[in-house]
Image (cartoon, grey):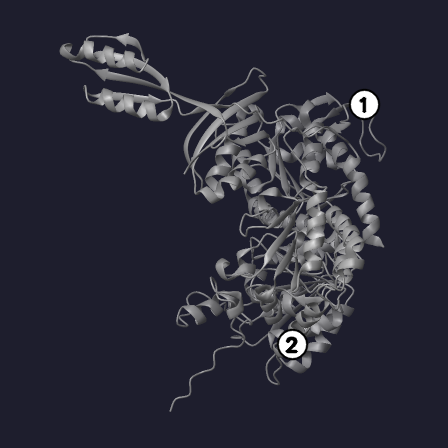
Amino acid sequence: MASTTTTQPIAAGTLLSGSQILLECLRREGVDLIFGYPGGVTLPFYDAMYDHEIQHVLVRHEQNAAFAAQGYSRATGKVGVCCATSGPGAMNLVTGLVDAMMDSIPVVAITGQVTSKLIGTDAFQEADTFGITRPATKHNFMVKHVSELPRIIHEAFYLASTGRPGPVLVDIPKDIFQASSHYQPVDSIHLPGYKLYTEGHTGQIRRAAQMIWESERPMVYAGGGIIHSHAHDELKELVELADLPTVNTLMGLGALPGNHRNFISMPGMHGSYAANMGMYNTDLIIALGVRFDDRVTGRLAAFAPHAKVIHVDIDPSEISKIRNAELPIVGDAKKVLQKLNRVMRELEPEMRALKSNQRAEWWNTIRGWMEEHPLKHEFSIDQIKPQHLMAEINRISNGEAIVTTDVGQHQMWAAQLIRYDHPRLWINSGGLGTMGFGLPSAIGAQMACPDKLVFTICGDGGFQMSIPEFATIANHKLPIKIIVMNNGYLGMVRQWQELFYNNRLSQVTLDSFPDATMLAGAYGFKGRTIDKPEELRAALEEAVNEPGPYFLNVRVTPTENVYPMVPAGGAINEMVLTPPQPVAVA
Amino acid sequence: MLQTLSLLLENKPGALMRVVGVLAARNYNVESLTVARTIDETLSRMTIVVDVESKVRAQVVKQLNKLVNVLQAQDLTEERSVAREMVLLRVRAEMANRTAILKEAEIFQARVVDSSVEGFAIECTGDPEKLDEFVDLMRSYGEIEVTRSGLVAVTLEPKKLRLASPVPMGAAEEEEEQQERVLSK
């Protein structure tokens, strides 16, 4: 059989093993890096990899392979690839796949399956990966014959990366890796049932432009879709053209630069006062690549009650799923915005003056809200406030660093208080809210962007779910700055127990945190713990100046809560701005 | 309300599972589901009746259309269409009732497919309401056992089948490169 060490395309008709065909298909898809973990049934694939130039990052748990692939994808926009063996390996990927599904991240997962003849016999390390991952993926495949392999692999990449992106899994039995076949390159993808709606209806786009110019209190509500479709320049153009106030969702932070004068903040449960009041009082929501998540809308009946909705989304099923759209536009955000901006300009001469007074008044109101209740940076002289930590990271990052997080209080503070001046800097588990996401996704992001400053900010809970990846970080000498915002609690759960369960703290105390210097030292890199506000700046600078990985464990005020807060099921205009004051005893 | 859907889908492994899975995951109650190959043996036709609130009707169709193997999902609830169901039932019949049962069957244009000392096996097709009446009627004659096929429906206003055309390999790559260029600006 031919060797596959070369970068040259392999000629049609060459006799190859299934493993070699897979590697050639990955090469054609431009894959130079996969995150994985080998096992029994993927042995033939890993054997073929031995002679191949593709880079493989050996993670320490398959779940983290899926998260690292996501980190790679979220940082670059390219498809992230992960690989696991049958049974337990594939099952460990599932959380990472669902996470990618919820946030529409293009990931291709390759899993090994037991030999075809053994399927259905409860063989060693057999699991029904195809069945179990069906709802965890945008689409999945099981390869039945080696000749199908090229078609399926290219279909998988096509499905993952086009339309609304998402994870796709390909399950490959061991005998398919081993079988040989005359390689036939695929020259086209034919998925007759896979309908893409990218262009946007011209008439609807014209009506949208009209509605935007006619509105008195417009609000752009932009999300992850802008980032997926690389539409940030077009968004900026639209926002500047009609001077539109803009909120970015948790998934959309960086879509409009954080330092842009039209950027208000993030809306929703822990969004700013101005963002939520803006959403409540607007008369026109221009929803771009968003899905009216419950964490944004709060109680639906009280969400933007005076507003009409223009909803642009590439996925028709998102339109009017949660909130009825008066003007739906199904299409790719970039293409739609390009057209919309053109029509906006066309109409500008006759329309600009139409509502200019009302618009100016709207901006005054919004600026008033922003000044009245800014997102506060808390400081204390004897404890490090979590907000202080984020403010210091923000100072160093200055809108340019990649920041990955887990889920919880630290995630919300990092979203509120760290600025993101470009898309793809802010990487976090939004929809699924998965603990343990931050560290492995930072591995993917740093592998993809070796020259960028990458922070991963974790809580002490989520961090302990992914400690094994210290080994991967050490192995590859990845200069990730691992910051643990350590409050000794599962902070967000504790916050809810305090606020909604009479402060009955049930199973949220995290004692026995490892010594940071010793833990990092055990893996051969530097680490330390700090707990004094005056140490913070120097410690962060030391971390950033360290050429290798650095683990900084920051002891923060244990009982600090995230505000503002819209309690679950509450109305967005009734958010709680500050902690309830203790009642004075007479 | 009951919503009748007609699906044309690729006859591929897992296609049925995907349809059923999405209905279950989205919390739509399935009343009946029938599936069989079409004349083109690479395709299957499925008729599904779901019980959903009327405001999510459009959502159900969109969710099904999103499946990669589904070529077309159509809501027939308010369209001009013909819907039929078949019931096979066994009815225990006393000697005294046998003639009466045969007469009733005739009224419903049902066919006796087996006759024995115990009673009859009868097949009947029609719209579901008519079958409900037939089943109720038969029950009044004695113990019955019923198997229903679930609804099959055909639209009388076929919509044009819109299929994705083949995409040359590399088209997506080129677009990606273009996007990268934009990014690096």
Subunit under mark 1: A
Query: Residue B167 occupies which quadrant of the picture?
Result: top right
Q: Measuring 72% from the left and 21% from the top, which residue is drawn there? A: A181
- For residue A368, the mark is 2
* Residue type marked 2: Gly
Residue bearing the label numbered 1: A12
Q: Nearer the viewer, residue A34 or B66?
A: B66
Q: Quadrant of residue B150?
A: top left
Mark 1: secondary structure: loop
The location of residue A430, given as percent across then percent down, is 60, 56
**Secondary-structure class at tag 2:** helix
One can see residue A51 in this view: no
The reply to the same-chain question for discs 2 and 1 is: yes
Where does residue B147 sit, x and y in percent of width and height?
Answer: 33, 22
Compared to residue A137, the image places residue A258 above or below, namely below
Q: Chain of mark 2?
A: A
Residue neighbourhood size for the residue with mark 1, other residues' Cα within 10 Å, grouped as few (<14), some (14–19), many (≥20)? few
Amino acid type at mark 1: Ala
